[in-house]
Amino acid sequence: GEVAGGMAEKVVDIVKAIEGIKAGTLQPASLDLAHNLIGDLVEKLAAALEDNVSIETLDLTFNNITDHSGTRLGATLKQNKTIRTMVLKNNMIGEKAAATIAEGLEVNSTLTCLDLTGNCIEEAAGARLIRSLSTQAALLQLELAFNRVAPGGAAQLG
């Protein structure tokens, strides 16, 4: 009853916020949607972020972001020129999304911190993310703890 109703109301508020960001009527410098379990709403958010010029910090920790919706978010990195910190901790981002994020990093010149702690990133995509550091001068911090990337993955920088 009340919990489900409260959650539905929260989702409506998040959708309205995403629509405001897309329309340019809502221009926060920071967007913290951590622990909202928004899942596939991330795709709508990613579309809104492509041309957004205000959000510098985005926290989507623990939101059930899957490989599918994470791929859409990764593609956003190719276009967005404002986000400096992106926190995607404790989601379900896997190989496909991590590869798309790495592609986005290769052309993004503004992101300085990317936190992918606690996802489902395997060796190959983890290595690709690490390799993207060599072409991405702005990125100062890449967190991959609690994924399936071996400690030797840092050898990819050599």
Image (cartoon, rainbow, N blue to C red):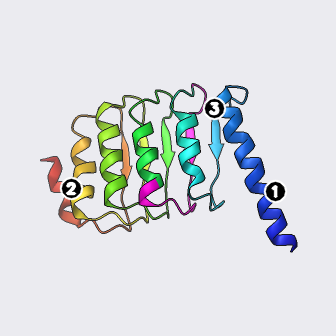
Image coordinates of residue 131 in percent, x first then y, are 21, 46
Q: Which callout, 3 or 2, points at the residue further toward the start of the chain?
A: 3
The magenta segment: 53-68
Q: Which residue is mark 3?
A: 22
Q: Which residue is mark 2?
A: 154
In terms of depth relative to the viewer, which is nearer, 5 or 30?
5
Q: Is residue 31 above or below residue 117?
A: above
* Amino acid at dot 2: Ala
Q: Which residue is mark 1?
A: 9
Image coordinates of residue 149 in percent, x first then y, are 27, 65
Crowd around label 2: few <14 · some 14–19 · many ≥20 (10 Å): few
Image coordinates of residue 47 in percent, x first then y, are 53, 37
Q: Which callout, 1 or 2, points at the residue further toward the start of the chain?
A: 1
Q: Is residue 21 above or below residue 94?
A: above
Q: How many badges with numbers are in the image?
A: 3
- In this rendering, position of residue 123 left or right of residue 41: left
